Image (cartoon, helix red, strand yellow):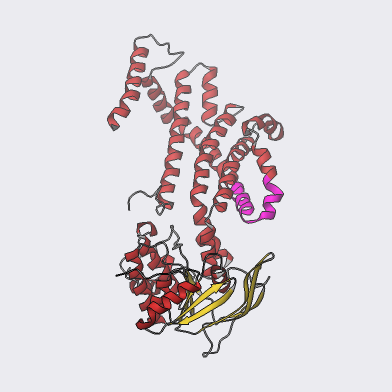
Amino acid sequence: MTLHVVPSSSTASPAVAVTNLRRAYGSRVVIDNLSLRIERGEFVALLGESGCGKTTLLRALAGLDPIDGGRIAAPRRPAVVFQEHRLLPWDSLWRNVALGLQAPNARERAAAALAEVGLGDRLDDWPRNLSGGQAQRVALARALVQEPELLLLDELFAALDALTRIRMHELVRELVATHRPGVLLVTHDVDEAIALADRILVMREGRIAFEHRTRGHGAQSIARIELLAELGVAAFQPIPA
Amino acid sequence: MLLLSWLAPVVLLIVWELLAQAGWLSPQVLPAPSKVIRTAFKLVVSGSLLNDLGVSLLRAVAGFAIGGSIGFALGILVGFSRVAEAAIDRSIQMIRAIPFLALLPLVIVWLGVGEVEKIFLVALGVTFPIYINTTLGIRQVDPKLIELGRVQGLGTLELIRRIILPGALPSILTGVRYALATAWLALVVAETIGAQSGIGFLAMDAREFLRTDVIVLTIVIYALIGVAADAIACHLERRLLAWHPNYGGAR
């Protein structure tokens, strides 16, 4: 039960390479011999029903849970954005963004990151004065200010209302295009996965059961039906116009 | 509304004064408020009141500092270490079950009736509320925030400084406020027995000579200092917990 996050420093290395990962709670195997490689700049969405192991995988990649077998090779510590914003209520926004940042110019870098998510004028504000969407934007800034090679997003849109969610999709797309980390987005929303990802994985019973590369807009409806079928929503009928 | 809330106490004071002036209230039972004020003035001018007040405050501060430090240190230890909790928490809880003033006779046997005994009693009263609220505060820190700290790469010390202590602070300050009240109570009791100086000594000395005006004055002083201590604690909460929706008020 030890952590096997092996640092690898070659520039050609992927954002993360997982080989034969195994994780079990007692006799229940949650992740079963799973291998996965995410390149830098690649946006991967991970779909799956509740309890399929997708959150466990994310937590293992984040180094939050020990693994029982296999190997996770990542050049640096990944950044994580959780479903809840997890801002420290006692710190101003810039201090939240700079949390764990080892740099003499932490405030300037935090300010730049906050400006990137459209909150550049709220540096000294408290988290409690933010809306849900704004708080998630600060959480994104906090993750990106670390210049991660791997960005883990744990259902970060799930608690947002529909309009805020669409705006957040745009923002995440822009930020990822600028910073080009490898991204693993855990979600249960097929449309979100199609809208954002270069590659969509469906996880089932601790394994990656299905893989789909998005091929532009024309193939989206087919992809949607296919993915929903993989998720067990078989009798899916398009709503008549 | 503010005016109305002050009306009752002011009327009561006036009625008290009038009753005393009319001679319906014996000065031996309850002296007139004006008499108490005159006595206060005289004692301030002679210097003895300020001297006794200083002695009492010093005892309170010393006892609070000692008891507070011990309570805080034990609270931190038990809050962070399951081993320390298993080793000492039960014993502390058992001692806590004793009303600390019940220990007074024993404390006097151990330490006599000098300064040490008084400071010890105050410290004893302060230790437990600080201990309990520190432990509780640390336990109540959101584990999700601690997890976040790990994800952001904080070391243990930074995790404590940036996340655990700020998260425990509301609870710790509640403990401080409660401890201030206990400290005062301990002081009153300790000073009533065998004191050679201090506000309590002033009261007991006055009792010998049936100087009810001085006794009432000491009661008022105890009350005022209690109110002042609470105000300081309140101010501390407002400043340190400005981020907290329940304390900080409007931004």
Q: Position of residue A170 (x, y in %)?
A: 34, 74
Quadrant of res B18:
top left
Q: Is residue B131 magenta?
A: no
Q: Which residues are magenta?
A: B69-89
Q: Nearer the viewer, residue A37 or B98?
A: A37
Whether residue A175 is visible? no
In the rendered view, tell whether residue B19 sits above or below residue A198: above
Quadrant of res A120:
bottom left
Q: Is residue B75 magenta?
A: yes
Q: How many numbered circles does the render carry?
A: 0
From the viewer's perspective, tell me whether residue A115 is left or right of residue B91: left
Q: Position of residue A122 (x, y in %)?
A: 33, 65
In the rendered view, tell whether residue A173 sits above or below residue B58: below
Q: Nearer the viewer, residue A105 or A158?
A: A158
In the rendered view, tell whether residue A24 sits above or below residue B48: below
Q: Position of residue A7 (x, y in %)?
A: 59, 82
